[in-house]
Image: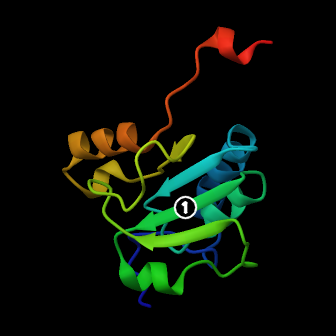
Amino acid sequence: MELTGEFFVPEQQGNIELEHVHRYLQATQIVAGKSVLDIACGEGYGSLLLAASATTVTGVDISEEVTRTRATGTPRDNVTFLVGDCSDMPVANQSVDVVVSFETIEHHDQHEAMMREIKRVLRPELPADVNSG
């Protein structure tokens, strides 16, 4: 796979590595015990990081080549990678608790469709009084 600079891969070092990995490491605290959709997951390094604390992670990327060569780290049973577009995701309605998407919107012009898709796939929150108990 040719490295064009369009996406980050773990072999890259320096500030770009710090920026990308740091974002996912921060997100691991938020996704603990939750079902996660990682939109524009690239080759999957971030999805694997999220899977260390999430219940399940579905990584979706538009590039079949990138998705096919995904994640160079240790495979995890709770991670699935799919080919899909952020404006038409191959994920069921109300099937995830959290959506993660870093550095995506500057690569397309389907922002409203992406937001509709995020709303479609997110589970509705339970009212606060249902959670207390």
Disc 1 target residue:
58
Question: Disc 1 on helix, strand or loop?
Answer: strand
Q: Is residue 1 left or right of residue 111?
A: right
Q: Mark 1 packing: few (<14 Cα in 10 Å), some, or many (20+)?
A: many
| Residue furthest out toward the left | 109
Nearer to me, 53 or 20 = 53
| Residue furthest out toward the top | 129
Total number of numbered discs in the rendering = 1
**What's the residue at 77%, 51% (across, down)?**
53
Quarter of the image containing the C terminus?
Answer: top right
Q: Position of residue 127 (x, y in %)?
A: 58, 14
Three-letter amino acid code of the residue under disc 1: Thr
| Res. 14 visible in picture | no
Above or below for 48 versus 127: below
**What's the residue at 60%, 75% (across, down)?**
12
Above or below for 88 versus 99: below
Above or below for 31 versus 44: above
Q: Is residue 34 left or right of residue 7?
A: right
Q: Position of residue 16 (x, y in %)?
A: 57, 61
Nearer to me, 4 or 114 = 114
| Res. 95 visible in picture | yes
Q: Position of residue 23 (x, y in %)?
A: 62, 48
**What's the residue at 52%, 72% (across, down)?**
81
Colouring method of the image: rainbow
Q: Which image quadrant for residue 66?
A: bottom left
Q: Is residue 111 left or right of residue 72?
A: left
Nearer to me, 109 or 35 = 35
Quarter of the image containing the N terminus?
Answer: bottom left
Q: Position of residue 27 (x, y in %)?
A: 66, 44
**What's the residue at 69%, 38% (across, down)?**
30
